Amino acid sequence: AQSVTQLDSQVPVFEEAPVELRCNYSSSVSVYLFWYVQYPNQGLQLLLKYLSGSTLVESINGFEAEFNKSQTSFHLRKPSVHISDTAEYFCAVLRMDSSYKLIFGSGTRLLVRP
Amino acid sequence: DTGVSQDPRHKITKRGQNVTFRCDPISEHNRLYWYRQTLGQGPEFLTYFQNEAQLEKSRLLSDRFSAERPKGSFSTLEIQRTEQGDSAMYLCASSSRDSTGYNEQFFGPGTRLTVL
């Protein structure tokens, strides 16, 4: 079975400060890794994904995440956040051998303050 | 709009009533998924279809829940004899399957169910 742990339920941060949202996963098989973002009253949007290759992946709006196989982590980082980054962020995994069931963490609410 | 759409966006019902939600996937996507998201939690997988075939159902999907995708296009999720514990956001997603085996799931806006 797979599981995803997001230890921080809420992360408050001031605008233009750096942020890291932590994600650890457990799986007995190889998985793909994802970060989704959910803005208020909207559906989930894929922020970035790790499928293979370089362990550092980036999004178009300045977020990045690094796959660390030895620590089974996929932490999300941004060097300087904006007010508009305020949202709920979900880490998720997908088994490579049966790629249909996303397993999500419980989410981290990023609250950016002016 | 060519994204995944869900109807209704909000549903308030009384305990014991039946409700039905509809999901229209992105056209030509052959896979369709249902997830449930309760307050303060991440989405949990309920079931998925490949074309019209329902290929897996989570244990979360009790006998009161039924999902269909009769023509391999839109899907419905029905909850019979609703309970207060059914209050949640019901999310639908769709995907195609590419040659590498990875298929990005595109999510709809969800249907928020409140059972009084």
Image: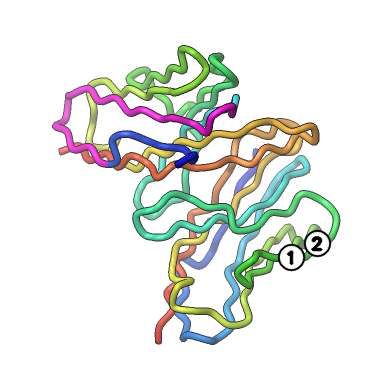
Position in image of residue B67 (x %, y %):
42, 20
Residue identifier under label 1? A66
The answer to which image quadrant residue B22 occupies is top left
Front one among B106 and A20: B106
Q: Which amino acid does label 2 sit on?
A: Thr
Q: Is residue A33 above or below residue B73?
A: below
Position in image of residue B31 (x %, y %):
58, 27
Q: Is residue B92 above or below residue B28?
A: below
Label 2 and label 1 in one chain: yes
Q: What mark, if any, has residue A55 been given in the picture? A: 2
Cβ atoms at labels 2 and 1 below 8 Å apart: yes
Front one among A28 and B81: B81
- Disc 2 and disc 1: Cα gap in Å? 5 Å
Q: What residue type is labelled 1?
A: Glu
Front one among A106 and B24: B24
Furthest toward the front, the residue is B1
Q: Which of marks 2 and 1 is nearer the N terminus?
A: 2
Q: Is residue A17 above or below residue A40?
A: below
Position in image of residue A83 (x %, y %):
44, 78
**What is the quadrant of the C terminus of chain A in the image?**
bottom left
Residue drawn at x 84%, y 60% is: A54
Q: Is residue A16 left or right of residue A27?
A: left
